[in-house]
Amino acid sequence: MRWASLALGDSLTAGYGLSNEDGFTKQLEAALNEAGVRATVVNGGVSGDTSAGGLARADWLLSDKPSLVIVELGANDALRGLEPADTRRNLDALVAKIKTFGARVLVAGMLAPPNLGRDYAAEFNPIFPDVAKAHKVALYPFFLDGVAADPALNQADGIHPNAKGVSVIVQRMLPVLLKTLGESQ
């Protein structure tokens, strides 16, 4: 079976500052194929996108009927200090919509930047596990796990991973993704 996958996200998915081959979707596709899973991963990332933007473009992205959708949105919501309740509503609606298309879903979580304070983080950080649990879909708790704040794994802006950082993300996410696909090894 060939898995037609869609990574729906922001600049982290789009591969901001990276060559096509060094970006998340190409590295993920290569890792899946290396693990023996025939997969194509479509890059549905748009730099600067928010959860509202992802929800707005979901219908046309889902029209190709992917069998798996990785939802990596929310970073820009937090960076802009948008209301966590709005982010929650958007992600909840997005996951519900994806499920109506029959696709499996992996929610890739995000954490609020520390400069927004504890109250914001307390409201924002639980969104991703809560949405995944409510819809009974897979969760990768923090997309930038092992990469955030490590200068060796990020571009000069300190926000976007470099090629090595993307490789860390892919290797850490791969076991969760394989389990989601029923391809655990």
Image (cartoon, rainbow, N blue to C red):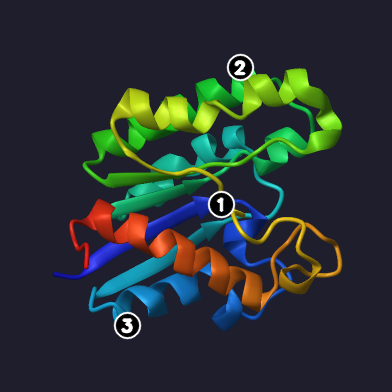
Which disc number belongs to residue 143? 1
Q: In the rendered view, would you say 22 is above or below 99? A: below
**Mark 1 → mark 3, Cα distance in angstroms:** 21 Å
Please report the residue visible at 36 percent of the width from the left and 27 percent of the height from the top: 133
- Inspect the image, locate mark 2, and give the three-letter code of the amino acid beneath it: Ala
User: Badge 2 is on which residue?
Assistant: 85
Q: How many marks?
A: 3
**In the rendered structure, which disc, 3 or 2, sits on the residue that comes first in sequence?**
3
User: Badge 3 is on which residue?
Assistant: 34
**In the rendered structure, which disc, 1 or 3, sits on the residue that comes first in sequence?**
3
Residue 79 at what x, y percent from top left? 78, 38
**Mark 1 → mark 2, Cα distance in angstroms:** 20 Å
Please report the residue visible at 53 percent of the width from the left and 27 percent of the height from the top: 127
Let me know if residue 7 appears in the view. Answer: yes
Categorize mark 1 by other alpha carbons within 10 Å: few (<14), some (14-19), many (20+): many
**Mark 3 → mark 2, Cα distance in angstroms:** 39 Å
